Image (tube, helix red, strand yellow):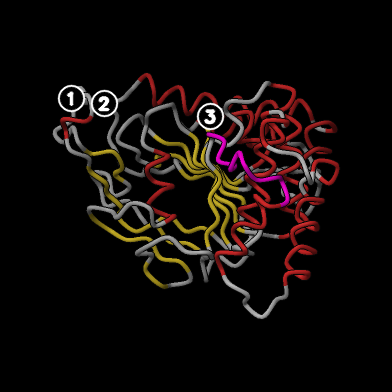
Amino acid sequence: MDNATPKLELIDLRLRYPTSRHLEVEGHADPGLAVDLKGTGDAPPIHIASGEFTIILGPSGCGKSSLLQMIAGLIAPAEGMVLKDGVPVTKPGRDRGMVFQSYTSFPWLTVEDNVLFGLRLRGSNGHSKKEKREKVREIVDLVGLSDALHKYPKELSGGMKQRVAIARALANDPDVLLMDEPFGALDPHIRIKMQELMLAIERRLNTTIVFVTHDAREAVFLGDTIHISTIRPCFLKYRFAHPFVKEDIPREKARERYSKDFLSFQREVEDRMQDLIEHPEAPRVIEEGDQLTLRRSMLGVLEQLSESIEKR
């Protein structure tokens, strides 16, 4: 990944809501503030490289979904800007696909027609109806729904409905896929299957993905880079580069083959998030040791994790 030419840049973003809509944040001078990436010490911009799977991890209600909606262009920031390929984001666009936690399929349309809907909104774009349907069937096959092509949403499970949502988001060939806790409402065993599906889609399409979650296990299994948020307002205090690089070893194999090291990394991420929850008064600045790049050496990742913990 080329960090010199980021796909996305989040620069000094701040978002405020009317205070009447939100509970006052104890000890915070600006209770309407939902997102504050600048913090109190002029934090550096967040850079997301092309093809990177980026996780925004934080407790429920911390403002991470609001941050994602700014990246999507659904909400305008009060301060700062979002750049995509160096160009300011000012509105939604087909170059950014969005998948929400709630089910968004049209109940009167089949799986095929739900996915086709976005393509129809684009117009012909030089493609015939036959070509569009062929493309839809390729995408539906990618998300594992070929056998449900002509079914309606009422005939689908929760996991299948989210597969439809992912397929519809991919239909317009976005180069950025934004996912707002898409598996949060699913049963645990279905959630694991959906996570594995996302890794398969990433390998196939090499799309830049920004994925919001409150589950550290999900973050560690999916992400290349993990940003951990404070409680509201959202400030991305910690940044982890995953020690198990997908180009070196598939994430599924890394979790199985190096289970002890994988679990240690997961616990470190969980501990950092819990620390932010328990210490909301901590300064919202980026300090030495807050942005960690961990790599698995011949001695394993445990040595490096131990070293980083001792320095805290």
What's the amino acid at mark 3?
A: Ile
**In the image, residue 30 lies at what x, y percent?**
16, 36
Indicate which disc residue 27 carries.
1
User: Which residue is disc 3 drawn over?
Assistant: 309
Q: Residues within 10 Å of mark 3 (few under 14, many from 20)?
A: few
Magenta residue check for 103: yes
Looking at marks 3 and 1 on the same chain, the residue that comes earlier in the sequence is marked by 1
User: Which residue is disc 2 drawn over?
Assistant: 281
**Tag 2, which secondary structure?**
loop
Looking at marks 3 and 2 on the same chain, the residue that comes earlier in the sequence is marked by 2
* Image point (58%, 37%), residue name: 182
Q: Main secondary structure of the magenta part?
A: loop
* Image point (49%, 43%), residue name: 239
**In the image, residue 298 lies at what x, y percent?**
79, 42
**Tag 3, which secondary structure?**
helix
What's the amino acid at mark 2?
A: Glu
**Tag 1, which secondary structure?**
loop
**Residue nearest the viewer, comparing 272 with 301:** 272
**In the image, residue 189 lies at what x, y percent?**
74, 23
Q: How many marks?
A: 3
Q: Are circles 2 and 1 on residues that touch, CB within 8 Å?
A: yes
- The residues colored magenta run 102-112
Q: Residues within 10 Å of mark 2 (few under 14, many from 20)?
A: few
**Residue nearest the viewer, comparing 175 with 7:** 175
256 on left or right of 210: right
How far apart marks 3 and 2 lie (CA) works out to 21 Å
54 on left or right of 60: right
Q: Quadrant of the N terminus?
A: bottom right
**In the image, residue 104 lies at what x, y percent?**
55, 40
181 on left or right of 260: left
